[in-house]
Image (cartoon, rainbow, N blue to C red):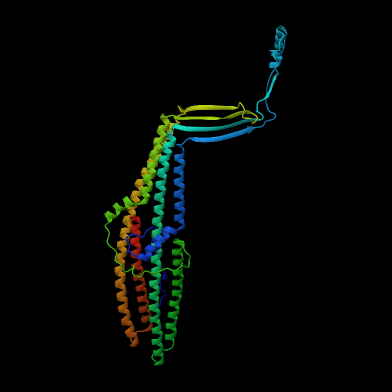
């Protein structure tokens, strides 16, 4: 008996994401919901959403007055000094005036010799500033809101991926269970074959080599079962990883899933629905809206000034005495860039180019989605036809085996014919199993690219 093609048990299901209109399964749906709740990748995306929401809060804060308490105290030594001989200039005059008036009304003054850096000086103040007109603040808030929407769309894309990953992993797990049943039936068949050969040897109809040969076929099948067990454990670990569970957690099998019918789909409707539902397009639409807001921001900056009011109050002077040191200042300010080498025009043009890039990207993604839908649809149709062929092959292989088995029991067929017939029936059953689950996988693929939930 030839070695069975174990690789047939693990036909890749693709790299898309979601379980949509494949037959309903409460068990599978519970695993999907658990994955959507516990998956570590999705938890990171939820944190990113919270982070984006805080950006909106910060953008709103710019509309409010900014109040700042800013005390400072300065000690200084050395450095530049301000020297002015005011005493040398005025004191002789003051002395003469005092003599003429016979008074002391004109006191002597000292020369100025003052450090430019103030020593023992404090400025303790409370300042505020309020924007009356600022286009940056307004449009930044609009941009942050749109970026939050884009982040939400990104999270839904990942949810789509998690759905499909869990679905395909679960289908692979069910397939290993079905393959195990096929191998168990095949082992029983080969065990009966060993017993049959023992009887033939006992009746001197055959020699002992037929027993050894049959036992060898059983050992080869056991090796393949060991590989199957390893593959099933690997799929179980991966499925639990997607749900952020203990890797050894039990997976409950829904054996009714594979037998449920799959409804036919209309290609044109699938394309239309995908263009309406795909979150990648929603994310791009939001990014285009952000770029449009950025254009308006640059255009407003080119023609509008920024106006604000503000002021400060506090104490200022030498030494922390607060006596006769109070002051208050009011401000109104305007900032308007009139010319900077056509920088503003360049920024507007740059923002428009970015929008054009996103428009082209949006059109490209639309085409890609329609291509994905077409490919997934035709792959599903091909998988359905392959399943019908595989079913027919299994029926014929079973009939062929019954005939060969009967001939072998009556001594009309050689051992090689029997082993070839048994190999054909095992291979046919495995191929039918692969074909059944491949149909479900292709349907899940179609559901994913069509954004079906």
Residue placed most toward the observer, 140 or 434: 140
Quarter of the picture holding the C terminus: bottom left
Specify whether 122 is left or right of 337: right
* Position in image of residue 413 (x %, y %): 34, 84
Residue 382 is situated, as x and y percent measured from the top left of the image, at: 31, 63
Q: Quadrant of residue 401?
A: bottom left
Q: Position of residue 235 (x, y in %)?
A: 44, 66
Number of labelled discs?
0
Q: Quadrant of residue 343?
A: top left
- Image quadrant holding the N terminus, namely bottom left
Instruction: Inspect this view and state whether residue 56 appears.
Output: yes
Q: Residue furthest bottom?
A: 203
Give the residue displayed 55% in from the left and 30% down from the top: 313
In the drawing, does residue 64 fall left or right of residue 404? right
**Residue sitting at 37 percent across and 58 percent down?**
18
Q: Is residue 391 above or below residue 375?
A: below
Q: Nearer the viewer, residue 248 or 227?
A: 248
Residue 137 location (% of width, % of height): 44, 36
The residue at the far top in this view is 100
User: Does residue 67 lie above or below 101 as drawn?
Assistant: below
Q: Is residue 283 above or below residue 306?
A: below
């Amino acid at each position: 008996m030839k070695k069975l093609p174990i690789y047939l048990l693990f036909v890749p299901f693709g790299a898309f994401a979601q379980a949509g209109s494949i037959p309903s399964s409460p068990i599978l749906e519970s695993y999907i919901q658990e994955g959507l709740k516990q998956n570590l990748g999705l938890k990171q995306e939820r944190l990113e959403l919270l982070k984006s929401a805080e950006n909106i809060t910060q953008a709103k804060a710019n509309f409010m007055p900014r109040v700042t308490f800013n005390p400072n105290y300065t000690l200084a030594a050395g450095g530049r000094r301000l020297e002015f001989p005011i005493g040398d200039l005025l004191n002789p005059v003051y002395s003469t005036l005092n003599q003429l008036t016979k008074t002391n009304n004109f006191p002597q003054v000292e020369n100025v010799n003052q450090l430019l850096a103030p020593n023992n000086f404090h400025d303790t103040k409370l300042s505020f500033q309020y924007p009356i007109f600022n286009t940056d603040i307004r449009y930044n808030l609009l941009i942050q809101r749109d970026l939050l929407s884009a982040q939400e769309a990104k999270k839904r894309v990942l949810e789509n991926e998690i759905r499909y990953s869990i679905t395909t992993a679960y289908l692979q797990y069910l397939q290993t269970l079905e393959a195990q049943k096929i191998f168990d039936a095949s082992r029983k068949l080969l065990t009966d074959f060993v017993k049959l050969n023992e009887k033939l040897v006992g009746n001197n109809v055959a020699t002992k080599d037929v027993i050894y040969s049959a036992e060898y076929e059983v050992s080869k099948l056991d090796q393949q079962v060991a590989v199957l067990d390893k593959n099933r454990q690997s799929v179980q670990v991966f499925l639990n990883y997607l749900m952020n569970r203990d890797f050894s957690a039990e997976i409950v099998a829904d054996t009714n899933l594979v037998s449920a019918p799959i409804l036919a789909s209309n290609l044109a409707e699938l394309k239309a629905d995908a263009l309406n539902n795909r979150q990648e397009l929603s994310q791009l639409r939001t990014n285009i809206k952000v770029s449009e807001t950025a254009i308006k921001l640059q255009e407003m900056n080119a023609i509008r000034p920024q106006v604000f009011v503000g002021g400060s109050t506090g104490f200022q002077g030498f030494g922390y005495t607060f006596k006769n040191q109070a002051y208050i200042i009011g401000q109104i300010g305007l900032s308007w860039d009139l010319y900077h080498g056509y920088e503003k025009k360049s920024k507007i043009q740059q923002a428009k180019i970015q929008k054009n890039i996103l428009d082209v990207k949006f059109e490209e993604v639309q085409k890609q989605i329609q291509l994905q839908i077409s490919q997934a649809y035709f792959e599903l149709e091909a998988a359905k036809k392959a399943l019908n062929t595989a079913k027919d092959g299994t029926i014929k292989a079973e009939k062929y085996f019954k005939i060969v088995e009967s001939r072998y029991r009556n001594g009309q067929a050689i051992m090689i014919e029997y082993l070839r017939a048994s190999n054909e029936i095992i291979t046919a059953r495995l191929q039918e199993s692969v074909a059944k689950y491949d149909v479900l996988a292709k349907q899940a693929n179609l559901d994913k690219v069509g954004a079906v939930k």
